[in-house]
Amino acid sequence: MGWMWGSAGGRRGGGRGGHRGGRMFEQGDLKFVILQLLEEKPRHGYEVIKELEQRCGGAYVPSPGTVYPTLSLLEDMGYARAHDDGGGRKVYTITDEGRAYLADHHDTVEDIFERVANFGASLFGGPMMDVHQAMREVARATYAQATRHPGDSDRLHHIVEILQRAAVELDAVRARSDASGNAESASTQSGDTSESAPDSHSGDTAPSTDS
């Protein structure tokens, strides 16, 4: 797939898994990712943004306010160099120091790529493909009706009601799943407590033999 790059597979155990807190990259990760892109070839800042978007399958689009300061940081660190492309735009290239920095942090770079690969596999593989297809069908049917009858308020209101009912049902699925998970966790904790409770009828003192 187009979003996967580098040697994302074959990592040893202990990778951090999927992205956390709704972010594709953890703090400090982006400089390694951008350096990897610059090692492949020189790029403009907007090319870095578009390449990251493509390789993440559109699930992550870095903002210019994130990418350009990172490029400036890499310049200040001596790991990247910028020059004018002749049209007033900066082209960034990796330096020898940048290549050495990537090599020194090989495991970190591999870990980042593994995390992105796992995220992409979960988002675009298996049953999720059915979800994406269903969403496309819903969008197609919705806009096919809405755009053909933009002035029909009754029809549009009916469409809205259908979509709202679907949203309510999906939220109910999540609520049931959360409730089930909480109940299972509570049951497990209760079982652990009962297993560890001391036997009130047992003791170390031997029964008395006095008559």
Image: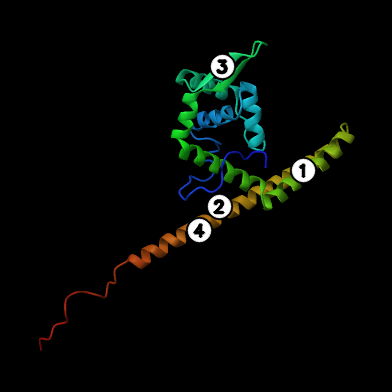
Name the amino acid type tagged 4: Ala
* Amino acid at dot 1: Arg
Q: CA distance from mark 4 to mark 2?
A: 9 Å
| Secondary structure of residue under mark 2 | helix
Q: Which of the two marks, 4 or 3, is nearer to us in this view?
A: 3
Q: Which numbered disc, 2 or 1, marks the residue that appears first in the sequence?
A: 1
Return the residue at label 2.
178
Label 1 SS: helix
The residue that label 3 is drawn on is 82
Closer to the camera: disc 1 or disc 4? 1
Image side of residue 145 versus residue 51, left or right? right
Report the side of 110 relative to 134 (left or right): left
* Residue at horizontal 29 percent and vertical 72 percent from the top: 199
Task: Say which residue label 4 marks.
Answer: 183
Image-based side of 173 in relation to 139, left or right: left
Q: How far separated are the C-alphas under marks 4 and 3?
A: 57 Å
Alpha carbons under labels 2 and 3: distance apart = 50 Å
| Label 2 or label 3, whichever comes before in sequence order | 3
Q: Nearer the viewer, residue 153 or 98?
A: 98
